[in-house]
């Protein structure tokens, strides 16, 4: 998992060594005890206090919730808005939610809470109109035609050129090959030095994996370039049986896409700029993990 580096290299090396020992003794599938430990997060004291005090009222709908209202996309009364971090995103995010997806179990809400100006959530069959902009929009979804983040610029460039040729054909003008400048001749489309098309919007599907195909195959999304995060692994506590560990929860997919976008497309060193997207997720991960650990300790040992 490529997270921001620890402020204490020696401690990080020791942690990595412990992880290696664990994998050697328990198998390669066993990860570090806390895969989210190196995130650069805002203080989560407000969440600890809210967890101790229990459920609170949503100031919009009046519903009783823990931490935030998953229907109004706002923190509850005992979680002051000013103590929730705001994350500035370099791209617009559209989330298409399946109507049968349980609101209280969805992590898509985290993105809307933490980056409200950049994130929009739609309930299927409501989908924004992407026709004519498929050269600047991608859909993050695994599939046989999916590409990696580092190849996005190249494929968007091909789409832009294809559109240019189509417009020329419509005007009954003989097709021609655009001349490239000396700079463009040596340009690698996967690097930020290439003045290729600009990615502006990323689409995610929020649904159980058994329901995703209905949305992904919709004709309004079918023509979008598909991107898969093939090297990332989930630590979601509701991981679905029979699915590979590269199938991520919605907030994980958004976070990892942006980290890869920052490194592979912007060609800039990632320094934790988007880590707070996992502000709620990491807290819940530890809360659930600790609860499960306590439950396991309380169980009597089986007799022989």
Image: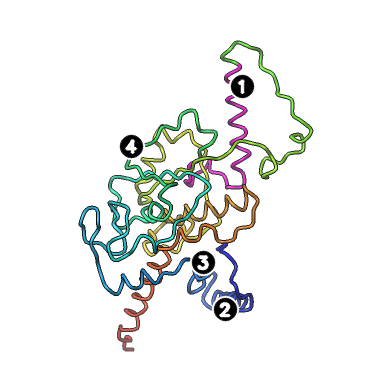
- Relative to residue 287, is residue 95 depicted above or below? above
* Residue topped by disc 1: 165
* Residue topped by disc 2: 18
Colour logic: rainbow
| Place of residue 25 in the rendered image (x, y in percent of width and height, measured from the top left) | 54, 78
**Which mark is first along the chain, 2 or 1?**
2
| Place of residue 14 in the rendered image (x, y in percent of width and height, measured from the top left) | 60, 79
Q: Give the structural element (helix, strand or loop) at label 1.
A: helix
**Which mark is first along the chain, 3 or 2?**
2
Residue 185 quadrant: top right
Contact? badges 3 and 1 (CB < 8 Å)? no
- Relative to residue 256, is residue 220 depicted above or below? above
The quarter in which the N terminus is drawn is bottom right
Contact? badges 3 and 4 (CB < 8 Å)? no
Q: CA distance from mark 3 to mark 4?
A: 34 Å
* Residue topped by disc 4: 126
* Residue topped by disc 3: 39
* Residues shaded magenta: 139-168
Nearest to viewer (mark 2 / mark 3): 3
| Place of residue 3 in the rendered image (x, y in percent of width and height, measured from the top left) | 56, 63
Q: CA distance from mark 2 to mark 3?
A: 18 Å
**Which mark is first along the chain, 1 or 3?**
3
- Relative to residue 163, is residue 195 depicted above or below? below
Of 104 and 23, the residue lying toward us: 104
Contact? badges 4 and 1 (CB < 8 Å)? no
| Place of residue 215 in the rendered image (x, y in percent of width and height, measured from the top left) | 37, 40
């Amino acid at each position: 998992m490529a997270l921001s580096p620890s402020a204490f290299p020696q401690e990080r090396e020791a942690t990595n060594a412990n992880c290696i020992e664990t994998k050697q003794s328990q198998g390669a599938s066993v990860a570090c005890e806390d895969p989210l430990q190196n995130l650069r997060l805002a203080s989560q004291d407000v969440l600890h206090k809210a967890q101790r005090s229990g459920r609170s009222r949503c100031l919009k709908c009046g519903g009783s919730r823990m931490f935030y209202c998953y229907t109004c996309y706002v923190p509850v009364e005992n979680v002051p808005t000013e103590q929730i971090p705001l994350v500035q995103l370099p791209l617009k995010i559209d989330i298409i939610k399946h109507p049968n997806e349980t609101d209280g179990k969805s992590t898509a809400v985290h993105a809307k809470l933490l980056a409200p100006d950049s994130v929009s959530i739609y309930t299927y069959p409501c989908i924004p109109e992407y026709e004519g902009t498929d050269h600047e929009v991608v859909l993050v979804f695994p599939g046989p035609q999916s590409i990696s983040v580092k190849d996005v610029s190249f494929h968007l460039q091909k789409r832009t050129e294809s559109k240019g040729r189509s417009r020329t054909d419509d005007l009954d003008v003989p097709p021609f090959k655009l001349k490239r400048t000396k700079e463009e001749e040596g340009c690698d489309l996967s690097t930020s030095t290439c003045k290729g098309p600009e990615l502006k919007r990323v689409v995610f599907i929020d649904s159980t994996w058994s329901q995703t195909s209905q949305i992904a195959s919709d004709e309004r999304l079918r023509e979008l370039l598909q991107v898969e995060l093939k090297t990332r692994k989930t630590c979601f506590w509701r991981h679905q049986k029979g699915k590979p560990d590269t199938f991520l929860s919605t907030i994980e997919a958004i976070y990892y896409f942006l980290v890869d976008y920052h490194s592979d497309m912007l060609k800039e060193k990632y320094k934790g700029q988007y880590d707070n997207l996992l502000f709620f997720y990491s807290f819940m991960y530890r809360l659930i993990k600790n609860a499960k650990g306590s439950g396991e300790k309380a169980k009597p040992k089986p007799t022989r």
